């Protein structure tokens, strides 16, 4: 029976036609990936052997957040699997979000579970309860039982606790772990210096081909959003909305993910205000929400002391806006005061230095070496790359949660 009279829910959405097009994990249809033709062509060349059941190159893809790395890796893997099928080659790809599955055991379990067809292999991959070595043994069985070639995408590979799974996957064939199946590993990182952290043996096998994805410019971001504008009802978007969202995202990050977030949030703000159009003024509000969500994602899972260090830098940035950067010792003094307020024992200055380096690695802040002359010697200054108001707001929310 329809028409229950419950007016709590909206049955007819006046703003969105197909909101899924604006979800981050949505893989666009062919022809909707904008500004990455060269990168797609180069990635296709690197994995091309897979369509004939041969070993594809192992790849490492770098680039800032929202530059299309994951999108293109999934797109190429999906296309390769489809074309391989036309050549009677049985293949598949597995995707691992290493920010979520950041231990070796979690990552190998995710790979094995996503590729396993129990009816074919008679292998069970439980969520937990097995040793890491047992998960690997079951993974090798799954691969040899079902596939000629498999691609494994390790997204945000820099978030892994160690390099062990990279060693296992990239050397599985030569180590005799697999008899017939070939593996290609695609590592994705936001950190251009990630390779420097790798064990030399992993580096030699994983980094066969390297690619750098540059940030999108405003025109590319505009085209990306226009390609997804059919997420909205006809006539809902004011003409200035997409250009303004593209300009904001290009100026700050060149981040397509953020640009799409801004567009989606602007639509949601229009909904909440009961507006029948998405107006430019909503874009500015949406940008603030996107910035907050982006930073919240960056510090997801961080420790209290890690957040206290960021709060200290945010406080300094807000109270002394005329200064570009702050010395470690100055940050430490404010950090100690925050610890006293939180009734927490402060960490050592050396450990705080390490935490600041970790935040720099995540592109939350920027570090620069300065010279104080013969009297002071050299020292490090730290500058927030995020809006300090946003940082403080999110940290307060996180600590109160």
Image: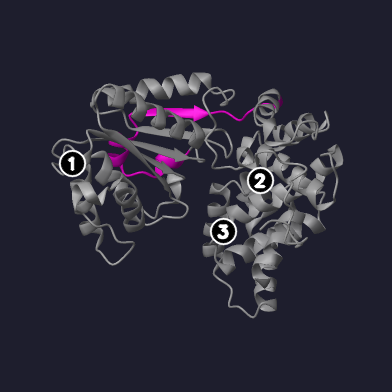
Say few, some or many: other residues with alpha carbon within 10 Å of mark 3 (under 14 / 14 to 19 / 20 or more): few
Q: Which residue is depicted at the point 56% across and 37% down? A: 64
Residue to which mark 3 is pinned: 300
Local secondary structure at mark 3: loop
* Near-viewer residue (283 or 199): 283
- Whether residue 323 is visible, yes or no, is no
- CB within 8 Å, label 2 to label 1: no
Residue to which mark 2 is pinned: 373
Q: Position of residue 310 (x, y in %)?
A: 65, 59
Left-right relation of 12 to 115:
right
* Near-viewer residue (380 or 307): 307
Say few, some or many: other residues with alpha carbon within 10 Å of mark 2 (under 14 / 14 to 19 / 20 or more): few
Tell me the tag on residue 80: none
Which of pointers 1 and 3 lies earlier in the amino acid sequence? 1
* Near-viewer residue (113 or 169): 113
Q: Which residue is depicted at the point 45% across and 39% down? A: 188
Inspect the magenta stretch and tell me whether residue 197 lies in it: yes
Residue to which mark 1 is pinned: 144
Residues drawn in magenta: 193-218
């Amino acid at each position: 029976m329809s028409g229950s009279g419950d007016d709590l829910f909206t049955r007819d959405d006046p703003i969105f036609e197909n909101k899924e097009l604006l979800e981050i994990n949505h893989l666009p249809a062919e022809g909707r990936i904008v500004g990455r033709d060269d990168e797609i062509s180069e990635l296709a060349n690197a994995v091309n052997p897979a369509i004939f059941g041969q070993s594809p190159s192992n790849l490492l893809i770098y680039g800032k957040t929202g530059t299309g790395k994951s999108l293109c890796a999934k797109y190429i893997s999906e296309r390769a699997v489809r074309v391989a099928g036309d050549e009677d080659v049985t293949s598949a790809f597995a995707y691992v979000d290493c920010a979520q599955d950041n231990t070796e055991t979690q990552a190998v379990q995710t790979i094995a579970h996503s590729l396993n067809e129990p009816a074919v292999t008679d292998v069970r991959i439980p969520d937990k309860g097995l040793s890491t070595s047992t998960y690997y043994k079951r993974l090798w069985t799954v691969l040899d039982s079902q596939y000629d070639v498999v691609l494994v995408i390790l997204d945000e590979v820099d978030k892994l606790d160690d390099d062990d799974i990279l060693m296992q996957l990239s050397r599985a064939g030569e180590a005799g772990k697999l008899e017939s199946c070939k593996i290609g590993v695609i590592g994705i990182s936001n950190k251009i210096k990630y390779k420097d952290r790798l064990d030399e043996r992993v580096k030699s096998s994983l980094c066969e081909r390297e690619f750098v994805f540059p940030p999108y410019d405003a025109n590319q971001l505009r085209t990306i959003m226009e390609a997804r504008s059919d997420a909205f009802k006809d006539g809902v978007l004011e003409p200035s909305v997409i250009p303004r969202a593209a300009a904001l995202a290009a100026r700050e990050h060149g981040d397509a993910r953020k640009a799409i977030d801004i567009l989606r949030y602007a639509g949601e703000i229009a909904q909440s205000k009961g507006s029948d159009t998405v107006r430019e003024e909503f874009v500015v509000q949406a940008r603030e929400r996107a910035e907050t969500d982006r930073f919240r994602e960056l510090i997801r899972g961080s420790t209290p002391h890690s957040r206290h260090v960021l709060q200290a830098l945010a406080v300094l940035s807000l109270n002394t806006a005329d200064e570009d950067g702050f010395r470690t010792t100055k940050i430490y003094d404010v950090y100690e005061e925050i610890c006293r307020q939180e009734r927490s024992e402060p960490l050592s200055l050396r450990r705080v230095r390490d935490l600041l380096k970790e935040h720099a690695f995540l592109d939350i802040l920027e570090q620069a070496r300065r010279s104080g002359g013969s009297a002071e010697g050299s020292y490090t200054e730290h500058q927030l790359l995020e809006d300090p108001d946003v940082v403080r707001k999110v940290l307060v929310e996180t600590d109160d949660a």
